[in-house]
Amino acid sequence: MKRTRRYFVQESDAARFIQPVGRDAWMLDRLLEAGPAGCTSLENPAPRVSHYIFKLRSVYGLDIETITEPHDGLYAGHHARYVLRTRVTALGEGDAAKAA
């Protein structure tokens, strides 16, 4: 069974509800937990983090900033840090029923 949760999205000119499922919901939860520090695939390994971010932007209309950071190590290079800029609140089961 896919993970599903309802979220309240508050933008400057409107408010709405979204209900991403599966890994899209998982990624949104990671962004909410990370807060202004943002998160990376190094901290939250998943098969397709950049794809989940793409879907949260394009399907759900969320503003997510991408910050490029360098990293050292055997495979030195750079990685993306994602920061959720849209105001989003995850609703619990009781909250979702009240908002319906």
Image: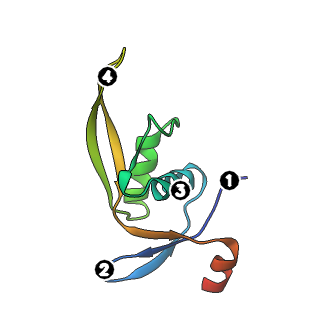
Residue at which label 4 appears: 72
Q: Is residue 7 left or right of residue 79?
A: right
As drawn, the label of residue 12 is 2
Q: Can you say whether 90 is above or below 98 in the image?
A: above
Q: Which mark is residue 29?
A: 3
Amino acid type shown at disc 2: Ser
Quick check: marks 1 and 2 in contact, CB under 8 Å? no
Residue 34, position as x, y percentages in the image: 45, 53
* Mark nearer the N terminus (3 vs 2): 2
Disc on the earlier residue, 1 or 3: 1
Cα distance in 3D space between marks 3 and 2? 22 Å
Residue 73 pos. (x, y %): 35, 18
Kind of residue at badge 4? Asp
Q: Looking at the picture, how far across and down is residue 26, in whole percent?
A: 56, 52
Secondary structure category for the residue under label 4: loop
**How much space separates mark 1 and mark 2, taking CA atoms?**
31 Å
